[in-house]
Image (cartoon, coloured by chain):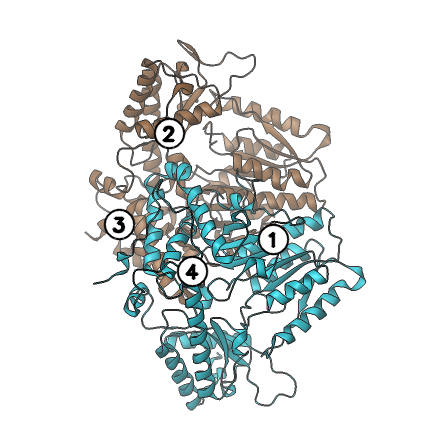
Chain colours: A brown, B cyan
Amino acid sequence: MERRDGGGGGGGEDGRHASRNGSCERSPKKAKLLPVPPEPISGPELRSEFSHHQRGVARINNGSFGSCPGSVLAAHRDWLLRFLRQPDDFYFNSLRGGILRSRSLIGDLINADDVGEVSLVDNATTAAAIVLQQVGRGFAESRFAPGDAVLMFHCVFQAVKKSIQAYVASAGGSIVEVELPFPVSSDEEVIAAFRRGLERGKRNGRRVRLAIIDHITSMPSVLIPVKELVKICREEGVDQVFVDAAHAIGSVEVDVKEIGADFYVSNLHKWFFCPPSVAFLYCRKSSGLVSDMHHPVVTHEYGNGLPVESAWIGTRDYSSQLVVPAVFEFVKRFEGGIRGIIKRNHEQVVKMGRMLAESWGTNLGSPPEMCASMIMVGLPSRLCVFSGEDALRLRSYLRVNHGIEVPIHYQAPADGVDGPRDKDGSITGYARISHQVYNTEDDYFKFRDAINQLVENNLTCKMLLIE
Amino acid sequence: MASPKNHRHHLHPNGDHKTHVPKKPKLAAALITDSEVQSEFAHHDPSVARINNGSFGSCPASVVAAQQRWQLRFLRQPDHFYFNVLKQGILESRGVIKNLVNAEDVGEISIVDNATTAVAIVLQQIAWGFAEGRFAKGDVAVMLHYAYGAVKKSVEAYVTRAGGRVIEVQLPFPVSSKEEIVSEFRAALERGKVDGSKVRLAVIDHVTSMPSVVIPVKELVKICRQEGVDHVFVDAAHGIGCVDLDMKEIGADFYTSNLHKWFFCPPGVAFLYCRKSSGSLDLHHPVVSDEYGKGLAIESAWIGTRDYSAQLVVPSVLEFVNRFEGGIDGIKKRNHEAVVRMGEMLEEAWGTNLGCPPDMCGSMIMVGLPACLEISSYADTLKLRAHLRESFGIEVPIYYRSPKEGEVGPITGYARISHQVYNKEEDYHKFRDVIDKLVGNKFTCKLLHD
């Protein structure tokens, strides 16, 4: 059956992509060539798709750098070869149409009203720079008063924090950080903390010009009730709301209209099987901000709208943006498509998280409904994770000595609060485990056993020798 | 059977890497043969006379293979790659470039996607100068009238929007001597300093794009210093592999060149040189990451998760060019000689002219097209170019030159022909013959109008 070749075929033919709505109820003419497969992808096929992953590594950190199946990589190589074969022809006749196709598929997936609201950029870090430069111009051009505030969670991704400093603080804006409670036990805790932060933001008659809300925080990782927080922002007169959803697409359902933010960004290479790197930046048309959004790399497309500007930022390899149709084909090979993948990843990561917490006598950082495909699992207090350095040391040790890849988070105990404890002391270290389609339970058993062994041998982080 | 694979392209696996890259080309075991060269570029469309290396460059198969190996290394175990491999790999590439361009210090070399990005980086800082009041409203940026379209827009977005004034240096075309360019440049600087404004930035192309001419940058930089221009930025998108580059000799504050145009890298990679000296602007990559504030080179080496493989193959590319006699210098010399010879062949066949003397071109040259083709607008050039591509399999960009008043039978169209190692004389003969045929059939661009 032709389908087993990996379905992506370099995207050479038009129309080899999902119909609207990501399903195949109404097949466009050319999609007749690609019927939905009768059976979902098999175990051996799946293993083959990820056979380039290093053997012997329990790869339970899909969250950091994502993953890309072999058939999509083949399509990716095909796109680059098409360019190299005859780049002028590619530039004039293939590139724009290819990018537009990718944008349309994503627009449908996220329920955007209009493909004009969807731009493709390298990654969420780039999108943050674009949004923050726009806000920075508000200060520089005196549309915002000095001291007006930008609000964000204290655990916002470090790159975003730096970007805020570079573009907003330096232009006169003030920064208000919202402490994310962690461990957390309910949406209400997060909402309450956010409201408190917003109050502080509006103190002394300041305007809150921008709120940056993670859909899924990075470290520690928690699924945030974004819809509610966006609503609160609107009620409280926040000018612009930017949802940084780097992890979202492919790990939760995304409906940008429902969420109602002005800007929404998610990486496609983390949980949506794209090669590094590609992200979409959604800019709501009705927000009226789109015309002042610009890609910082200016070309002759300047002023033609962010989607068009981003689709040409000089000669480079746009293959990662062009393979999106091949990725849609890939996920269709799974039962339930991307929804099915989301559901099963979530169930498995919760199951594995519970298994680890039980074996170690520790806790989970959030309840199951506040996580997607990643969950924070408390590490035994006896490991003595007392700093960021300890956490990094433990991570390196696990990688080098045990072939386990998992990021470790240090959670400083909150003042005056009795934090979570195990039978030996305070739990201050958490592992962020991920589950993606290529993971097996053995990956997590390996991790369980390595930690138990450390505890048995009375080893703390500071004592770890890395080969 | 000798194949490119016999020459090991080592990827410097952990712990095994060259720390010193010699400036002079290493003598390869055997020089690359003609058939090996054809094999390296066998992925090019064989039906196309590809005489436009200048627009998008070219990349040999062995470098593409090296790039794929880097990509797979990342995909195999990305965390390990990020923590243990990436930074060192980028540093090695920067070291290779530093030696190639005669920079003082590897800290002066940053790697970015392309010259367009480098331009945005420099201009962003100029914009801050205005925003922070270090520059007065009306202070000037000078650039060439033939500056690349993207650069012009970037100047508009960053300088004009911030309150700066832009002065364009008018250049004659066709041009017959460096002196013509130098005197126009001086005149533009004078205009810039009128009313006591300061010239904060001069953007000077090393090789203009359309029409393509090699600019006497060394002389112009000297004039800038004499006339008190704050910062000089040389845009050498076509630089490395096309003209001689020597950072110390040229003496600019900032210098950028693409590596995928004439230095066989995959798309897209360029370097931005920032001279280590006091008074230099503090440059930043616009995509801010957690490396912000550690210097442009470090910032540019991590702008979030993406594919850095085009930047990492630079050592492999050096190995490739060293398989040619004389390395990159030899390639440059032979490309220049060939493109001049082909240009002269074409102008003679068509009875037209060249856009500049041979000593003002690198690996590209402008050749006048017969006036009877009636190329009368920029739109005509695009249509003619598409017609040549689609009907005849010839890829060559065309430039429209407005006729001067009183000119009789003016030549208004120029083809910018390139020569790179994969080109053959047949490519240019094909072009010559197609144009002769069009002329013979009384073809004009009017026929391409709807």
Q: Residues within 10 Å of mark 1 (few under 14, many from 20)?
A: many
A413 with respect to A74 (left or right): right
Which mark, residue A6?
3
Circles 3 and 4, Cβ within 8 Å, touching? The answer is no
Label 4 amino acid? Leu
Q: Is residue B411 visible?
A: yes
Q: Nearer the viewer, residue B236 or A38?
A: B236
* Mark 1 lies on residue: B122
Label 1 amino acid? Val
* Mark 2 lies on residue: A406
Q: Nearer the observer, disc 2 or disc 4?
A: 2
* Label 1 – label 4 distance at C-alpha: 28 Å
Q: Is residue A28 visible?
A: no
Which mark, residue B326?
none
Q: Nearer the observer, disc 1 or disc 4?
A: 1
Badge 3 and badge 4 both on one subunit? yes
Q: Residue at x 44, y 75 (%)?
A: B337
Label 3 amino acid? Gly
* Mark 4 lies on residue: A95
* Label 2 – label 4 distance at C-alpha: 38 Å
Q: Nearer the viewer, residue A152 or B181?
A: B181
Q: x%, y% of residue B378?
A: 54, 75
Circles 2 and 3, Cβ within 8 Å, touching? The answer is no
Q: Residues within 10 Å of mark 2 (few under 14, many from 20)?
A: many
Of the two numbered discs 2 and 4 on the same chain, state the one appearing first in sequence.
4
> Which residue occupies the extreme left position in the image?
A1
Q: Residues within 10 Å of mark 3 (few under 14, many from 20)?
A: many
Instruction: Assign a secondary structure to mark 1.
Output: helix
Instruction: Assign a secondary structure to mark 3.
Output: loop
Q: Nearer the observer, disc 3 or disc 1?
A: 1
Label 2 amino acid? Val
